[in-house]
Every structure is written in C-alpha cells, then in structure tokens.
Amino acid sequence: MHGRALAGGCGLATACDIVLAAETARFGYPEVKIGFVPAIVMAILRRNISEKRAFELVTRGFDFSAEGAKEMGLVNQIFPDADLHAKADEYAAEYSKMSPSAVRLSKQLLYQMDGKNFFEAVDAGAIMNASARMTEDCKTGIAKFLDK
C-alpha cells in the first residue's frame, strides 16, 4: 500500500491476508462523514481488530498512519517509501519457499476456527492436520526430512 487507502481502498486492504505498506501510507474509513456505513467491510474489520477499535474507526471517520494500522493489526509490515516495491517483492518471494497446500489449508483453518470454542477449534485443527498429511506437498516434505 502506497499513498492513501480511504473508504473502499481501505476496505480492500482490510480484506487482504497480507498488507505491506509504505511508511507514509494513510488508511481510513471516512464513510460516516457522508452518512454511509462500511457495512460489508465491518465483518472483515471485526475479524482483525477489537470491537471497540473497529467501532471507533468506522464511527469517527479519521485517517491513520501505517504505523497505527500496524499497531492495530491491519498492516503486516512497513517499509521505507523508496524501498516498498523491492521489499514487497522480497517478502512475497518467501512464499515461493512454502508449501502452497499448507498455506491454503492454514488460511482455511483460520477461517473455520473463527467463532468456535477452544475444543471445537482443536477438533477442526485435528481434522485439518489429517487432511494436510494427505497432500503431495506434505508427503514430499516428510520424505525429504527423513532422508536427511
């Protein structure tokens, strides 16, 4: 994220799994100022931050810094403006070293666990663990580990 992400732009950033921002980036949900409610985005926002903070952001309409967004959990990493694209490429390249199926299943499990109690979440984790073990990525990874 470089520049300003306000209203819909901030909503798009909120919906992303990973947000990398330039240090001068600004975020905000100013819809309240024109009588609108960022209703759909609020479902995603509420998953990412506390209810009190989400309420404040969508009812006061102020913009906030990349550092503030990171402190709230809306931004993963902040980079100097001049280095943003290169650093974002480096960050993304790390995912090429990860198992695509494990990343996909991890995301799926995070969404499944939302709203479950502890025991239901552990059960969902056990089921996902069994599913992950059946993937080619896992079978290959375990074989490589055992060959060491």
Image (cartoon, rainbow, N blue to C red):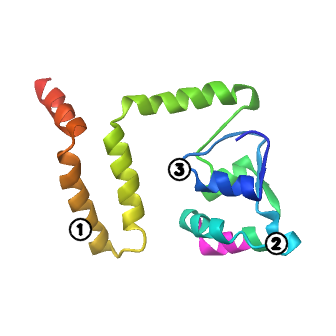
Does residue 129 appear left or right of residue 52 in this picture? left
* Residue interval drawn in magenta: 49-56
Main secondary structure of the magenta stretch = helix
Locate the C terminus by quadrant. Answer: top left
Q: Position of residue 88 (x, y in %)?
A: 60, 31
Q: Quadrant of residue 8?
A: bottom right
Residue placed under numbered mark 2 in the picture: 32
Q: CA distance from mark 2 to mark 3?
A: 25 Å
Q: Quadrant of residue 64?
A: bottom right
Does residue 148 appear left or right of residue 102 in this picture? left
Query: Residue type at mark 1?
Result: Asp
Q: Quadrant of residue 120?
A: bottom left
Question: Of circles 1 and 2, which is in front?
Answer: 2
Does residue 25 appear left or right of residue 145 in this picture? right
Q: Is residue 58 above or below residue 73?
A: below
Residue placed under numbered mark 3 in the picture: 17
Circle 3 packing at 10 Å, graded few (<14), some (14-19), many (20+), is few
Locate the N terminus by quadrant. Answer: top right
The residue under the point 73% across, 52% down is 9
SS at badge 1: helix
Q: CA distance from mark 3 to mark 1?
A: 24 Å
Q: Are marks 1 and 2 in contact (CB under 8 Å)?
A: no
Residue placed under numbered mark 1 in the picture: 123
Q: CA distance from mark 1 to mark 2?
A: 41 Å
Would you say residue 51 sits in the magenta stretch? yes
Query: Residue type at mark 2?
Result: Val
